[in-house]
Image (tube, helix red, strand yellow):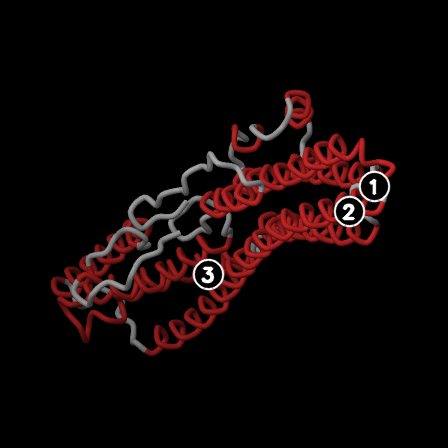
């Protein structure tokens, strides 16, 4: 994701990082070359070149603009929904870390105060309770990293495995759906807390709501990732944009003359740029310049949750590469 201040009016024309120009440069250059060829042919052989009026291009341009607007709006809605889902992931993981420590500690404190007969066991119980608390929070960290790898199709690395035991790591490597498996492990930790009476049923129900919310976030992200916009719709837009930009010089050459290649290139930049931008936003979980900064967000979750556990050696935040946040 590109995060930067708005450049000045002069620099605005020379910004390439984060621009779609490098992606659509071949289409722009080819459109300009077609415009120059049409101008050259018209100036040398005016009677042999088919010349069109501007009217059909105006009608087709308006129609194409409307369709591109609908497509880009649909792509942006997918991008924004994905960002809201990851915002909810941050909320739920922070809430889970806070609740599991608050509820479990309160339960043990109440036992210590109101059940004197088990005071000889409370030290071991508190240590065991804190172990389950820590495991549950660490699993939430692993889940956020695993969700990122799952959506991007990248290899799972140490950021997922470092909080897991060797046995759990071996089991995780064998399963196909790793984020869902980690959710099951979190449910197992919650069951242990409830069975050992480290938390009450009401507290367990509240924590289960957090796990259910994480499961809903996982399913919603998969829905966006696995359901692209209809291929026929994209194909129609691609074909229409190419046909429009390559035929446009035939309608402009009589009125613009030598400026035909320049104007054609500007119009091609507009249409192909909107098309390319909509295509990038369609899948917001990738690693292009306009996709969501999943690595930054998942590492921020790790830092926040480790602070909740009062850990001292916190990882450093992910530094952006210039204006690019991964």
Q: Position of residue 240 (x, y in %)?
A: 43, 62
N-terminal of the pair, mark 1 or mark 3, is 1
- Callout 3 touching callout 2 (CB < 8 Å): no
Q: Position of residue 201 (x, y in %)?
A: 84, 50
CA distance separating discs 3 and 2: 60 Å
Q: Secondary structure at mark 3?
A: helix
Relative placement, left or right, of 235 versus 322 is right
The residue where tag 3 is placed is 237
The residue where tag 2 is placed is 107
CA distance separating discs 2 and 1: 8 Å
Tell me the residue at 40%/57% (across/down). 277
Task: Pick whichever, 94 or 310, lies toward us.
Answer: 310
Number of the front mark, 1 or 3: 1
Q: Position of residue 242 (x, y in %)?
A: 37, 58
Q: Secondary structure at mark 2?
A: helix
The dot on residue 185 is none
Tell me the residue at 40%/55% (across/down). 276
N-terminal of the pair, mark 3 or mark 2, is 2
């Amino acid at each position: 994701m590109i995060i930067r201040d708005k450049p000045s009016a002069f620099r605005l024309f020379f910004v390439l990082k984060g621009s779609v120009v490098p992606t659509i440069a071949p289409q722009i250059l080819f459109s300009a070359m077609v415009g120059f060829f049409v101008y050259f042919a018209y100036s040398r052989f005016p009677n042999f070149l088919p010349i069109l009026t501007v009217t059909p291009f105006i009608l087709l341009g308006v129609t194409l603009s409307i369709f591109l607007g609908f497509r880009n709006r649909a792509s942006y809605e997918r991008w924004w929904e994905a960002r809201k889902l990851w915002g909810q992931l941050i909320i739920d993981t922070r809430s889970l870390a806070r609740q599991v420590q608050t509820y479990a500690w309160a339960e043990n404190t109440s036992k210590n105060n109101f059940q004197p007969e088990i005071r000889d066991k409370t030290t071991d119980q508190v240590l065991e309770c804190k172990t389950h608390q820590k495991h549950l929070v660490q699993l939430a960290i692993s889940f956020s990293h695993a969700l990122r790898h799952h959506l991007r199709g990248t290899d799972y690395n140490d950021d997922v495995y470092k909080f897991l035991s060797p046995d759990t790591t071996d089991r995780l490597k064998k399963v196909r759906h790793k984020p869902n498996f980690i959710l099951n492990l979190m449910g197992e930790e919650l069951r242990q807390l409830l069975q050992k009476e480290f938390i009450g049923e009401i507290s367990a129900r509240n924590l289960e709501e957090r796990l259910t919310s994480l499961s809903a976030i996982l399913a919603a992200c998969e829905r966006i990732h696995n359901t692209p916009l209809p291929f026929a719709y994209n194909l129609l837009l691609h074909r229409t944009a190419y046909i429009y930009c390559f035929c446009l010089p035939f309608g402009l050459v009589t009125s613009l003359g030598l400026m035909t290649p320049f104007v054609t290139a500007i119009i091609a930049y507009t249409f192909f740029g909107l098309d390319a931008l909509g295509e990038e936003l369609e899948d917001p979980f990738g690693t292009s310049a306009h996709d969501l900064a999943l690595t930054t967000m998942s590492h921020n979750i790790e830092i926040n949750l480790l602070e909740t556990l009062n850990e001292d050696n916190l990882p450093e935040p992910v530094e952006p590469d210039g204006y690019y946040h991964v």
